[in-house]
Amino acid sequence: MSDARYNFKEVEPRWQKAWADADVFAAPDTSDKPKYYVLEMFPYPSGRLHMGHVRNYTLGDVVARFRKAQGFNVLHPMGWDAFGLPAENAALERGVHPGTWTRQNIKDMRAQFGPLGLSLDWSREISTCEPEYYRHEQKMFLDFLKHGLAYRKESWVNWDPVENTVLANEQVVDGKGWRSGVPVERRKLNQWFLKITQYADDLLQAIDVLERWPDKVRLMQRNWIGRSEGARLQWTILTPDGTPLKDKLDVFTTRPDTLFGASFCAISPNHPLAVQLAEQNTELADFIADCNRLGTSEEAIEKAEKKGFDTGLTAQHPFDAEWEVPVYVANFVLMDYGTGAIFGCPGHDQRDMDFARKYGLPVICVVAPKDADAADFAKRLEEGDEAFTGDGVAIKSEFMDGLEVDAAKRAAIEKIEANKQGEGVVQFRLRDWGVSRQRYWGCPIPVIHCDSCGAVPVPDADLPVTLPEDVTFDQPGNPLARHPTWKKTKCPSCGKDAERETDTFDTFFESSWYFARFCDPKNESLGFDKALADQWLPVDQYIGGVEHAVLHLLYSRFFTRALKDCGYLSVAEPFDGLFTQGMVGHETYRGEDGTWLSPDEIKRFDDGRYVRLTDDTHVHVGRSEKMSKSKKNTVDPAHIIGTYGADAARLFMLSDSPPERDMEWTDAGIEGAWRYLNRLWRLMQDVDASATDLPAVDSHDEPSASLVKAAHKAIAQVTDALADFRYNAAVAHIREFSNTIGDAEKASAPARRFAVETLARLANPLMPHITEEMWSALGGNGLLVDQPWPKHDPAMLVEDTITLAVQVNGKMRGTIDVAADADKDTCEAEALKLPTVQAQMDGKQVRKVIVVPGKIVNVVVG
RNA sequence: GCGGGUGUGGCGGAACUGGUAGACGCGCCAGACUCAAAAUCUGGUUCCCUUACGGGAGUGGGGGUUCGAUUCCCUCCACCCGCACCA
């Protein structure tokens, strides 16, 4: 009699050691097998693994183990996204150096990874905060400079007043910093930019090719890139006394067809013309200052009134020199989009309509629905407050009259181009990626500023530019900027005294190419060897949270293209398949005073009431929300794994919900998973390991035959489910199969042994430790992790007799058992014999009988 | 406001190209074992009527197509997510 309970504490570490000793997860660069690159978004080394990590890496591990068994040469690496602000905050709070803090966290987290039993190739581990890593991205940046893909310019930026640094557009969410959560301010700074807009069209079009990406993410990227077709046209600006300004006003529009409905022009408060006018006009200067003070937060925009300031200038209509419209500075015109100037057509743009009504500007209808009475429609529109933005035909528009919107647009653009007043253009919402950050714990930007030569690249021979260790965090601001000596250097070009760039790269810089570094992680002279990158890339299956849909995932797509154009590698798309997993949540609890309570501060009664342990007061139970410290609903993975083991944690995570959906962590769920492991354990102990002589399926031994058939069915079902990320369904099929084995008491010993062995093999990617133990107990050769994936025999799925559903008028009335190849007449006759069918036919006639072979018999009566 | 997604028992969720709705699990109920508990095992568990046999209703609401709809079409509702003064 062996142990009644499965002892994971002994079993799991033993197999982890066996895998490590045999080095089974190392990915050789040369192999006969086809490659398969599985990657999960690498973690920031916070020091603590959380449940979100466990879910992410478990999902990736299932992919990796399944593909390995299917005969692929699997690359499944792990590393650390090690630069970032939390390290500096730790330095500030505890006086520990960011490097020391980060490296200790990496050590701690690596230790926490061990008990999970993941199939990782640790020989490829990388850490982005080490010069061995970031020196290569300094080189890449210099190559981008040479290829015109990086530039420096002064511009308005998003300034996070808490993090004391600039943020990229993608890092501003609802007008707030993505990490600090405080409203960003606008500042004008000199910044380094990467020319992501150069690839806007390609990044957009190639989304169509990313068929193995979630539609949601593809859509988000499409919207973010925001392509719109329209025209740019130049308006001549006249001063109040009628003299034209030297510079014409460049305006972007998507509706050139509505030009004859123009009633004003408006420019952004930050438009050069506005700034210039404000120099002589304090009222305008105050207005501009007012606009800039306004936050960009959601509420601020919502509440903000559309305000304009009449400059007194007028703009000459492009198609009619006699026609002049007023020029406003308006708070709703963005300097960041288009040209920072618009023409207003109140009849066909709601915002322009609101503006026109407020400032008493004319409303001219120039598009009417095809079937409407044009004059009547125009009258109502021009008297009302609603703009018409639908499709229709141009009216009161001279040469465009009668044309539908699209045709009118083309005609307008033709005319504008013929008149040399502008041209048809494609405008993107996407902005260039600002990568300068005024922080210490990041990769130094390898540039030297010289008074005579300007910004000079650091020569290749002087790379890497490493971070100084002796920095202080006793005051706000960038420690690099106030370091006494670090920035002092000589100009590589003229040799005079010069200063280093003290900004560092955005942390998304490191994560934009790490997947390529894993292909050749030890390369000292290059970021990676081109041949190796070409061999392993693209990543076949990438897995991570949807929160990076337009951050990391877009930057990486751009970066890979830029690297390609600089000759680093050959692929343009880094991630062939993407899977975005849901969050791990937990119920939340609040006391009567509103404070959050953790699960161990409350007590649940059988009747469903919850009270606070300290004083028995009522506890409000909230819905499941993403685990967070502030809501006190976190569950520590280390504690769970210590109590139930990695396999139980993995099983629960995989079985509870489909992987793309949010899941709720519950005690009952993990308990249930743990019970199942013990069930597997007992199942295994009932098997005679020596019964290896599985006979051919014999109809005289029905119990054995059906068990073997069930095994083949399970192989087919589990294989399909694993192949398309239906892991919860895979678990259901595995459990169903174990129920079948448990019930098959009359099956022969060889049949039972075969079934349990098959079960172990199918469950291996999900529960690698206990299945390895089962394999070994059944006398399997070598390690289960090295075994090929089982194949089902299609002949085994064919049944002799089948059960057909019988309906009367579409309602289920019973079932019949017939031979699998029974003809329609037989099925019909059998169905009509059913008493429940007869009862329904009382006094009625059979109109017809529909027999769908193998599916259903439907008797239509009436 | 624009765009997208989701809606199935007490709960998480199954259901291939329209064909036995509720697989699998959680929870719950009953029983076995036990002095007792835990663990385990057996049976039950969509709702309503019925001792049972059986019948009726049922996949967010309403309508449609079909012999047959969770699945296809129209419409409405609720919730979630993304973007948001984008010219």
Image (tube, coloured by chain):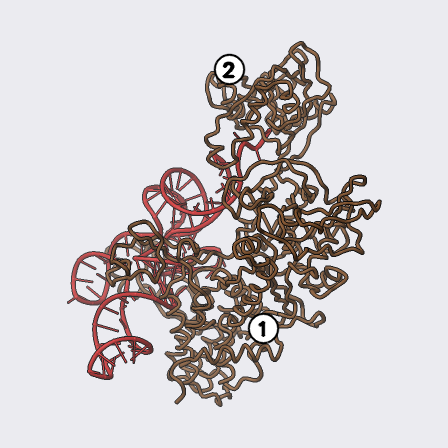
Q: Colour of chain A?
A: brown
Q: Secondary structure at mark 1?
A: helix
Q: Earlier in the sequence, mark 1 or mark 2?
A: 1
Give the chain letter for red. B
Q: Nearer the viewer, mark 1 or mark 2?
A: 2
Q: At which x and y percent is residue A475? A: 57, 47
- The residue wearing badge 2 is A360
Q: At which x and y percent is residue A168? A: 60, 43
The outermost residue toward the right is A494
Whole-number angstrom distance, CA of label 1 to CA of label 2: 73 Å
Q: Where A395 falls versus A208 (above or below)?
A: above
Provide the chain ID for the residue under circle 1.
A
Q: At which x and y percent is residue A713? A: 47, 72
Task: Give the image quarter of residue A258.
Answer: top right
| Tags 1 and 2 both on a single chain | yes
Q: Residues within 10 Å of mark 2 (few under 14, many from 20)?
A: few
For the residues bearing labels 1 and 2, Cβ distance under 8 angstroms: no
- The residue wearing badge 1 is A69
Q: As drawn, is A609 to the left or to the right of B87?
A: left
Q: Where A461 falls versus A124 (above or below)?
A: above
Residue placed most toward the observer, A726 or A116:
A116
Disc 2 marks a residue whose amino acid type is Gly
